[in-house]
């Protein structure tokens, strides 16, 4: 040991100690403690602690369709103001074709249309106008929809009482959610599956003919009842007041109507609501949620206070959820769940237990085998292996990585592969010991010769696992993190720690030759 | 110490390359069969790549038959399978579209609620996502293989790169063929396994190639075949040792790591066996295709 550089001993000692010290929080503690040291612990992935992973897609196509409907309504209104008749309106591909009765006044119509929609293309050819939007316009519609959706989803999830949710944008039109510890993913999916567009429309009870023909005249629409699709209402298309003016909503209980949701409007909403109710006493007022009528009570008196209740055969859970939805606000476009992975706490706990047993047994088997083959040198390799595991766990903990089930597989695999560098070294030493008689020279040559092979071998594995990380998704990423860290740690332990231990062992036992 | 280290002596002298034709034929047949299998039978794609819904449940002493009787009349494509023990059952369903999945899961839960003691997991992958995952997996594999080969090409002469490609392709195809025969579920984690096999196989090949290169420099007057045989023998105990330790860890993972990880562990076990075989019997012999002695360049290096 006399000639062994002190700085090397020092570095190995420091790094291994750090590995052990920072692995302890991950091994011993499960919960956050608030202590900076103890919180250097690896996070368990949803597959291990239980919870839900959801990938939502914002249905922006719906918005584009809506936009085209707005165009067609606007054109009709402007044409009517200008007393020009429209023969028909057609959607052809990505264009809205409007065929007017005459070519007169089309310039006026065009300019007043463009006052409403600045960046829309409106071209006139003879008596036909075509309206279209460009990619930029589409993108801005989508972008703002995603941003709003993110906001609303966040509010809804917060209201649902989920702890530490992760909500982020993924790609151009998706939202990724990680909800640890969620026990009833169906309820969350229900909450997210509703657009929650709330609008108050006046009911037209005079025009029974349109209703029976099921054709809505201009400015009207036919909507069915939430409880019975056969029951239809003829409503004014333009809503009198909408959910965007709500400032509060709560589940409540009405002695006669059962579970209900009470709501309160802001000043603007209260004014609109007051106006609508005072002008239409005796008529019916429909509460429309996501395209179906929840309830349509007769207005008995003007409601000017800006608050009211919605009833409609709710269960207490439904009333509570509706209140959450109304408080959080409406989504700009429907969300579709395109991927879900929910794991119950039972399976997560089982996976952790199985992972622990598999790692432990794998390690014991490898250790026994190494001792059988290499004797004392096997013990050295095993010490390196254990140090290696401590270092992997401590690295995972300090970088705040998430341990998943495939991650555990990566660790178990590392146990098997980590001894490889040691094996390479020992085999080289064994070869050299045949030729060389000086023991320290033999050791040195063994390590030197093995070095380039170890580097080549490990760098190829590292390349594979880094690319897995970059291009892989979900479980692949978790696996590649532990495998990469394992490869890096095993290079260090083999080249530094094993080296030190071999020298230490040889000088301690004053061996003159190596019998591997 | 216990004499076990003498299983493979330092000076082993097996003439691996003398039987290379047999191994070429054996591997050729294996690859041909694998391709046939992949083409006609295909892989048992999991929901990651096929899309659909998967629900894992623990029953309270209900048999798989009872559950099947309840579910089959209600869904078009439903399959039930025991998962590890007879109280844990996996239910797989196909959905036409995304919206349907929520209703499907709710309906399943309602129908069998009283037979279930725990809903252990539910997974749903929509049609767009599953094709994306497949594409991404394919990308990950291709890029990883390319990067590895570029590295080999930079570190060694191109002939070695060729040998590595042959061995790698052999390993991946052969492994996929075995997965197809055994009907192992092919999922995202299986892709990770296949890639790790690629890494492992290359790793193994590189170690032997390293020695081939070294010996080519050292023994310039010995026949190529003998140099190659010697190189394989030099590294043989390492090759066997590392395979055994890796297999020990993987077998432990397969036996004790839980049901979910089994396909991954199995794929790895198959791959490690094939990878070890190919490094010795396929990768090195392919180098014989080139009548090369790269000593000219190497003398400058030294």
Image (tube, coloured by chain):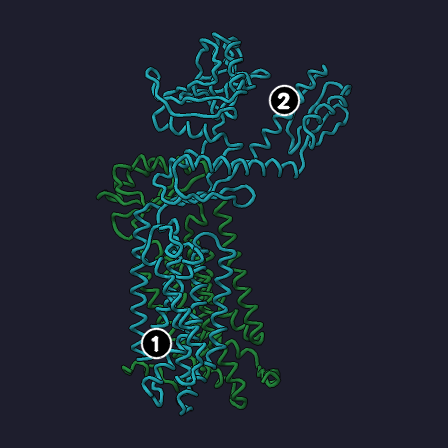
Chain colours: A cyan, B green
Residue A504 in picture, x, y percent from top left: 36, 81
Q: Residue at x 52, y 52 (%)?
A: B135
* Front-most of residues B84 and A432: A432
Image side of residue B2 versus residue A336, left or right: left
Considering every residue shown, the one lying at the far front of the view is: A35
Q: Residue at x 40, y 85 (%)?
A: A2
* Front-most of residues A50 and B280: A50
> Which quadrant would the N terminus of chain A be assigned to in this image?
bottom left
**Helix, strand or loop status at disc 2:** helix
Q: From where the camera sits, is residue A357 visible? A: yes
Q: Is residue A288 above or below residue B127?
A: above
> Which quadrant would the C terminus of chain A be assigned to in this image?
bottom left
* Residue picked out by circle 1: A380
Is disc 2 in the same subunit as disc 1? yes
Q: Is residue B104 above or below residue A380?
A: above
Q: Is residue A500 above or below residue B199?
A: below
User: Disc 2: which chain?
Assistant: A
In the picture, the disc for residue A338 is none
Image side of residue A216 versus residue A430, left or right: right
Q: Residue at x 41, y 70 (%)?
A: A14
Residue A321 in picture, x, y percent from top left: 39, 29
Residue A337 in picture, x, y percent from top left: 46, 39
Q: Is residue A203 above or below residue B218?
A: above
* Residue picked out by circle 2: A73
User: Disc 1: which chain?
Assistant: A
Few, some or many residues within 10 Å of mark 2 (<14, 14–19, 20+): some
């Amino acid at each position: 040991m006399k000639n062994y550089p002190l700085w090397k001993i020092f570095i190995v000692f420091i790094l291994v100690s750090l590995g052990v010290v920072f692995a302890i929080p991950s091994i011993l503690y499960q919960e956050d403690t608030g202590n900076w040291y103890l919180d250097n612990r690896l996070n368990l992935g949803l597959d291990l602690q239980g919870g839900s992973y959801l990938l939502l897609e914002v249905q922006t196509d719906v918005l584009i369709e809506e936009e085209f409907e707005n165009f067609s309504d606007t054109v009709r209104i402007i044409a009517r103001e200008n007393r020009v008749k429209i023969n028909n309106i057609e959607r052809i591909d990505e264009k809205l074709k409007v065929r007017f009765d005459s070519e007169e006044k089309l310039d006026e119509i065009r300019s007043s249309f463009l006052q409403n929609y600045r960046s829309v293309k409106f071209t006139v050819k003879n008596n036909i106008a075509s309206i279209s939007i460009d990619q930029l316009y589409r993108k801005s519609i989508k972008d703002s929809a995603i941003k709003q959706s993110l906001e609303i989803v966040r509010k809804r999830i917060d209201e649902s009482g989920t702890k530490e949710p992760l909500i982020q944008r993924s790609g151009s039109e998706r939202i990724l959610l990680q909800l640890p510890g969620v026990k009833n993913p169906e309820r969350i999916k229900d909450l997210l599956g509703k657009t929650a567009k709330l609008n108050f429309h006046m009911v037209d009870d005079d025009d029974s003919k349109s209703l029976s023909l099921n054709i809505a005249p201009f400015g009207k629409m036919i909507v069915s009842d939430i409880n019975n699709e056969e029951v239809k209402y003829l409503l004014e298309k333009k809503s009198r007041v909408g959910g965007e003016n709500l400032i509060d909503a709560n589940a409540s209980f009405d002695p006669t109507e059962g579970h209900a949701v009470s709501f309160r409007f802001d000043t603007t909403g209260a004014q609109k609501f007051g106006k609508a109710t005072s002008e239409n006493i005796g008529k019916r007022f429909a509460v429309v949620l996501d395209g179906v009528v929840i309830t349509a009570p007769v207005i008995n008196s003007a409601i000017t206070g800006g608050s009211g209740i919605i009833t409609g055969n709710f269960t207490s859970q439904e009333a509570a959820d509706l209140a959450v939805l109304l408080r959080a606000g409406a989504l700009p476009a429907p969300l579709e769940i395109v991927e879900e992975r929910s794991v119950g706490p039972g399976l997560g706990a089982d996976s952790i237990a199985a992972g622990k047993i598999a790692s432990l047994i794998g390690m014991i088997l490898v250790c026994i085998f190494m001792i059988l083959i290499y004797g004392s040198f096997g013990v050295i390799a095993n010490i390196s292996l254990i140090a290696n595991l401590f270092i992997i766990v401590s690295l995972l903990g300090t970088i705040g990585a998430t341990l998943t089930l495939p991650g555990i597989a990566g660790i178990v695999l590392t146990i098997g592969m980590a001894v490889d560098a040691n094996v390479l070294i020992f085999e080289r030493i064994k070869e050299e010991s045949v030729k060389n008689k000086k023991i320290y020279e033999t050791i040195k040559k063994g390590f030197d010769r093995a070095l380039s092979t170890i580097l080549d071998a490990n760098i190829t594995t590292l390349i594979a696992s880094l690319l897995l990380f970059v291009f892989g998704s979900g479980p692949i990423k978790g696996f590649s993190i532990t495998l990469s860290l394992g490869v890096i740690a095993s290079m260090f332990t083999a080249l530094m720690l094993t080296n030190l231990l071999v020298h230490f062992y040889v000088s301690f036992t004053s061996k003159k030759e190596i019998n591997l | 110490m216990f004499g076990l280290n003498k299983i493979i002596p330092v000076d082993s002298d097996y003439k691996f390359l003398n039987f290379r034709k047999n191994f070429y034929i054996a591997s050729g047949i294996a690859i041909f069969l694998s391709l046939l299998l992949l083409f006609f039978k295909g892989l048992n794609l999991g929901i990651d790549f096929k899309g659909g819904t998967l629900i894992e449940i623990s029953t309270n002493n209900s048999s798989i038959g009872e559950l099947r009787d309840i579910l089959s009349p209600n869904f078009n494509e439903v399959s039930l399978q025991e998962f590890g023990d007879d109280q844990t059952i996996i239910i797989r369903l196909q959905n036409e579209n995304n919206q349907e999945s929520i209703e499907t899961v709710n309906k399943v839960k309602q129908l069998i609620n009283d037979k279930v003691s725990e809903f252990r997991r539910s997974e749903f992958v929509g049609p767009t996502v599953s094709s994306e995952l497949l594409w991404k997996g394919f990308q990950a594999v291709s890029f990883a293989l390319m990067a590895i080969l570029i590295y080999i090409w930079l570190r060694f002469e191109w002939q070695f790169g060729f040998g590595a490609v042959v061995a790698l392709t052999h390993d991946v195809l052969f492994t996929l063929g075995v997965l197809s025969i055994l009907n192992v579920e092919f999922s995202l984690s299986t892709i990770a396994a296949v890639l790790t096999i690629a890494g492992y196989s290359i790793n193994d090949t590189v170690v032997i190639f390293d020695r081939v290169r070294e010996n080519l420099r050292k023994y310039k007057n010995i026949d190529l075949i003998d140099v190659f045989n010697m190189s394989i023998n030099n590294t043989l105990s390492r090759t066997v040792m590392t395979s055994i330790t890796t297999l020990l860890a993987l077998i432990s993972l397969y036996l004790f790591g839980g049901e979910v990880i089994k396909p991954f562990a199995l794929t790895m076990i198959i791959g490690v066996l094939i990878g070890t075989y190919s490094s010795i019997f396929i990768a090195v012999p392919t180098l014989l295709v080139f009548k090369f002695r790269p000593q000219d360049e190497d003398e400058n290096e030294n």
